[in-house]
Image (cartoon, rainbow, N blue to C red):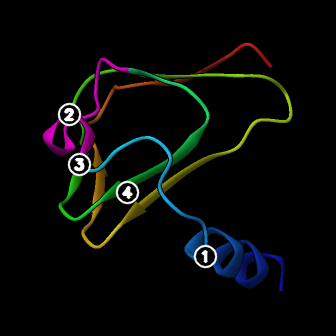
């Protein structure tokens, strides 16, 4: 399936943007394309922006959970 193919591809990619960015709280940040690796839970407690081109890839790898607070936005800019 496409989901399995995407998962297998993402799991094999190496980190390019640092580990545990923002201590896991990435709300309020503007992230650029790349692979972000977290060994902790990821929290989005305020709006987050992904800035890149139409063909850019953003991968969030985590051994924990990803949670987003109600009424927050994920904003895509540049593509």
Quadrant for residue 52, please give it: top right
Quadrant occupied by the N terminus = bottom right
- Residue 35, compared with residue 48, is above or below; it is below
First along the sequence among labels 1 and 4: 1
At 85% from the left and 35% from the top, the residue drawn is: 55
Circle on res. 22: 2
User: Relative to the observer, which residue lies in front, 5 or 70?
Assistant: 5
Circle 2 SS class: helix
* Distance between mark 3 and mark 4 Cα atoms: 6 Å
Is residue 21 found left or right of 34 in the rendered image? left
What whole-number distance in Å separates the C-alpha atoms at marks 1 and 4?
Answer: 12 Å
Contact (Cβ within 8 Å) of mark 1 with mark 4: no
Q: Residues within 10 Å of mark 4 (few under 14, many from 20)?
A: many
**Which label's residue is closer to the chain start, 1 or 2?**
1
Q: Mark 2 and 3 residues: CB-CB less than 8 Å, in contact?
A: yes
First along the sequence among labels 3 and 4: 3
User: Dot 4 corresponds to which residue?
Assistant: 37
């Amino acid at each position: 399936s496409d989901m399995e193919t995407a998962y297998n591809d993402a799991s094999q990619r190496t980190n390019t943007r640092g580990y545990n960015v923002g201590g896991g709280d990435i709300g309020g940040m503007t992230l650029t394309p790349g692979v972000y690796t977290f060994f902790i839970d990821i929290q989005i407690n305020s709006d987050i922006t992904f800035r890149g081109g139409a063909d850019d890839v953003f991968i969030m790898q985590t051994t924990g959970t990803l949670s987003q607070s109600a009424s927050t936005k994920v904003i895509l800019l540049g593509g």
